[in-house]
Image (cartoon, helix red, strand yellow):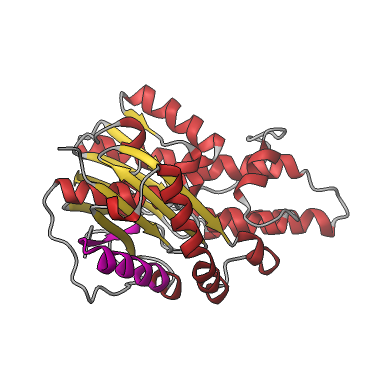
């Protein structure tokens, strides 16, 4: 008998993602984004995101089914992000997933958004080594996770205590007059800059600081003050150097703490995920440091690093294979769902 076909829904923020996965094989990954509608506000507006999900949901499901060459009746299970995320956005995805699960008479699995970012790597590189360590970096999260069993046990080792890395990219980009989201334009500008031009601070790296937690608020403020001082003095701002130096500070802290956590935990596999994992310097420095430490680095393609339905379907497939009980029909959204809750 073939492996079950899982339909996944992701609506935790501004992307409407619908994916279809069979086992570890990705069949389709349809995506609709409302990013352009948020750009003039310099960040995601929850109400706009929720309305965009409502408009995009059915067409995105139809596109995913068509790309996979299957019909809704072929689906064996439905998975959906139950949290963490924007409550209104999560509720749209939950309503859609419940409707399809009920109409098709198939089990429903509410999954954790962060765990799904880890699971998506299995679609590209096969079964995850267990235990593994995961470094998830996005606009809302900077997390170090220990993953003994992706279907049942994920533990938080460290997290951001203020601005997440992606949020810092957005705010620094605004200071430099770049568009939202800030990650891609900073990455592009940094290619022509000197990462050692400006010695920006590395947050929470002192001997008394939490070894695995992250802080990027001070770095963001330091960049803003440096740029402001140049402008007040009537001097030109070397945008490429600022971008490269800022990006280097972020990548340095993230990769150093991830490698340290691997060593301290006795784990030799690291998964890098989340939207900021598409950053070229972060990927390169992680590869360099993992190679030096004898750690196997697994990084999904940039498309799979950002929010998508494929990652939710991938985790749903893992839960089905592990025999995890489906979620109750009254499954609700939890905007602050803890990582220890892989499924609800």
> Position of 327 compared to 16: left or right?
left
Q: Using the rendered view, name the quadrant where residue 17 is placed.
A: bottom left
Query: Would residue 214 be seen by someone viewing this image from the given angle?
Result: no
Left or right, 334 with reference to 181? left
Q: Quadrant of residue 329?
A: bottom left
Q: Residue at x 43, y 28 (%)?
A: 287
Magenta span: chief secondary structure: helix
Q: Is residue 8 above or below residue 3?
A: below
Closer-to-camera residue (30/253): 30
Q: Is residue 54 visible?
A: yes
Q: x, y percentage for residue 261? A: 29, 41
Please provide the residue range marked out in magenta: 91-113
Q: Quadrant of residue 297?
A: top left
Magenta run includes residue 93: yes
Q: Quadrant of the C terminus?
A: bottom left
Determine whether, in the image, residue 172 is placed left or right of residue 252.
Answer: right
Locate residue 307, reporting x and y percent: 45, 53
Residue at 54% across, 76% down:
47
Q: Total label count?
A: 0
Along the line of sight, the residue nearer the viewer: 13 or 313: 313
Is residue 36 one of those drawn in magenta?
no
Q: Residue furthest right?
A: 234
């Amino acid at each position: 008998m073939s492996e079950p076909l899982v339909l996944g829904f992701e609506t935790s923020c501004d992307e409407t993602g619908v994916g279809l996965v069979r086992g570890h094989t990705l069949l389709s990954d349809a995506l609709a984004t409302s990013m352009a509608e948020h750009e003039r506000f310099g960040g995601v507006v929850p109400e706009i995101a929720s309305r965009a999900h409502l408009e995009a949901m059915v067409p995105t499901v139809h596109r995913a089914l068509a790309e996979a060459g299957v019909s809704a009746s072929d689906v064996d299970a439905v998975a959906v992000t139950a949290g963490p995320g924007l409550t209104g956005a999560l509720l749209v995805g939950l309503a859609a997933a419940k409707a399809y699960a009920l109409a098709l008479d198939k089990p429903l699995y509410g999954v954790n958004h962060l765990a799904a970012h880890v699971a998506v790597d299995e679609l590209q590189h096969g079964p995850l080594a267990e235990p593994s360590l995961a470094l998830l970096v996005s606009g809302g999260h900077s997390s170090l996770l220990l993953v003994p069993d992706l279907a049942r046990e994920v533990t938080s080792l460290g997290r951001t205590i203020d601005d997440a890395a992606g949020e810092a990219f957005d705010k620094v980009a605004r200071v430099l007059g770049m568009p939202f989201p800030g990650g891609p334009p900073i990455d592009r500008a940094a290619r022509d800059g000197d990462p050692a031009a400006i010695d920006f601070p590395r947050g929470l790296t002192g001997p008394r600081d939490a070894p695995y937690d992250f802080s990027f608020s001070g770095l963001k403020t330091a960049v803003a003050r440096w740029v402001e001082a140049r402008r007040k003095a009537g001097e030109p701002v070397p945008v490429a150097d600022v971008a490269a130096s800022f990006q280097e500070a972020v990548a340095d802290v993230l990769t150093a703490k991830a490698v340290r956590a691997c060593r301290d935990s006795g784990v030799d596999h690291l998964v890098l995920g989340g939207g900021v994992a598409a950053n070229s310097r972060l990927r390169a420095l992680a590869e360099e440091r993992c190679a030096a430490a004898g750690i196997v680095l697994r990084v999904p393609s940039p498309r799979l690093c950002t929010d998508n339905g494929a990652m939710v379907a991938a985790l749903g497939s893992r839960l089905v294979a592990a025999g995890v009980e489906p979620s109750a029909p009254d499954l609700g959204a939890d905007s602050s769902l803890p990582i220890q809750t892989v499924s609800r």
